[in-house]
Image (tube, rainbow, N blue to C red):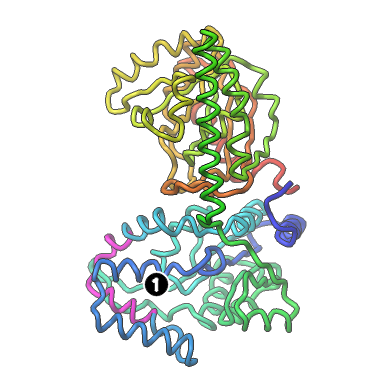
Amino acid sequence: MSDLSQPVQDAIERIASGPHGPQVGAFFDLDGTLVAGYTGTTFFGEQVRKREITPIDLLRSIVDVVDGEVLGGDPTKISQRFFASLRGQSEEAYVAAGERLFLRKIAGTIRAESRALVRAHLAAGHTVAVASAATPYQIAPIARELGIEHLVCTRLAVEDGVFTGETEGPMLWGRHKAAAVRAFAKQHALKLPQSYAYGNGYEDVAFLSSVGSPVALNPHRGLQAAAERLGWPILNLRDPAKGSLTSIARTAAALGGLNAAASTGMAISLLSRDRQRGLSTTTGLINGLPLALAGVSLNVLDEERLWSHRPAVFVANHQSSLDPVVLGALLKRDFTVVAKKEARLDPRALAGSLLLDPVYIDRSNSAEARAALEPVIERIRSGTSLMIFPEGTRSATGALGRFKKGAFHMAVRAGVPIVPIVLRNTGELLGKHSFVLKPGRIDVAVLPPETDWTLKTMDRRITKLHKTFEQTLANWPGQED
């Protein structure tokens, strides 16, 4: 079962069955297309918050919005005024601000179905670009997150590391964006009749007309009418779910279910004086219950590999605080975890931690961390598997971080296999700065267990495994289905 709407799934199948190769372009507009809403508003709001825009400029901007959106004036005027307000500001500082805004506010606005469309084009070997009137400071973090290499966008003039308040060439709006896309296609030897373009506004008609396969995504009224008149496909993508009352209630139910199950297991442990019986009760109750209460389902590939080589060290990529719950639902029993010491008082899993008896380590003290792991080695040898995230910390964007060696050293010393688990979508359902779990589907791929790890071959094998994780995330098994 797919989380994609049928029209989006059909579009992906057409991409997969169409021409492949770098001579085919795929151009995505940014605001309202790849992301829900407008990144420029986020940047403008940040300047207002920091009082980097004078009251008179703010008033003029409001007048520009009314003129452009209501009275039919120049819609680019507000952007030009915003660019002018940057005069004298450091480009380096602005890049850093853009990265912070992306992590805090913009990353969560990327549409999941837009991600799927981008992935489909990348899988087909197409040359994928963001084509937008926005600036690189808005686009670059989003493009990096989606694996898009090329930007066709408005460039701001910089002298001696500061903005001049002007643009390099025209703002890529309307016909200027269309011209820039055609120039990019010529430079990269793209075949535009075989290429794709995605946009949402009436100003994108010229841009969309530049390719053989234009698509109107969540189109405004003007583009909707033009697309219907010209016979272009129209796709209405779902916006990222927000923290609705339903989502909040489901999150509370999931958290309550998690701790209630753990508390029940604890009580059984105390009454029966059998810790293992209590743990089995807990994991039996927890298995899928909190996720089901939150409206989250798991789509697991090669689930049998979770049981073929136990005990084992299970390693997974880390995008979200939801990840341990997902792995707990997958592993079910006879496992423990290694966590940073700060997680000891995390209320989201406090009761469960009393039963699982996790090992908390101080990352700032390597000697103490190694000493704390000694008892874990013995537990693994005696039949308890270990769940661990080799990146060490959650990825803010979903991009795979560097693997640390601790998990692999423990596998070598305990003489057990490594079982890799690749998680996809958890960060989309519960972001790094979010406390509300969105409903949806989580994709899980259990990779073949890897045996016979040694210190001599460890570095090479870690590098190879990291590459396998990257390739799995980029080309998800069975995604063409």
Residue 112, compared with residue 54, is above or below; it is above
Mark 1 lies on a secondary structure that is strand
Question: Where is mark 1, residue-wise?
Answer: 155
Is residue 286 on the magenta stretch? no
Q: Is residue 41 left or right of residue 182?
A: left
Q: Main secondary structure of the magenta part?
A: helix
Quarter of the figure with residue 375: top left
- Asked whether 269 or 214 is in front, the reply is 269
Quarter of the figure with residue 91: bottom left
- Asked whether 28 or 192 is in front, the reply is 28
Q: How many numbered marks, from 0 up?
A: 1
Is residue 89 on the magenta stretch? yes
Whole-percent x, y for residue 107 in the image = 46, 55
Residue 450, compared with residue 322, is above or below; it is above
Whole-percent x, y for residue 172 in the image = 47, 77
Whole-percent x, y for residue 268 in the image = 54, 16
Query: Which region is colored magenta?
Result: 79-95
What type is the residue that disc 1 sits on?
A: Arg
Q: Residue at x 54, y 20 (%)?
A: 265
Q: Residue at x 31, y 25 (%)?
A: 362
Q: Residue at x 49, y 20 (%)?
A: 356
Q: Is residue 90 left or right of residue 42?
A: left
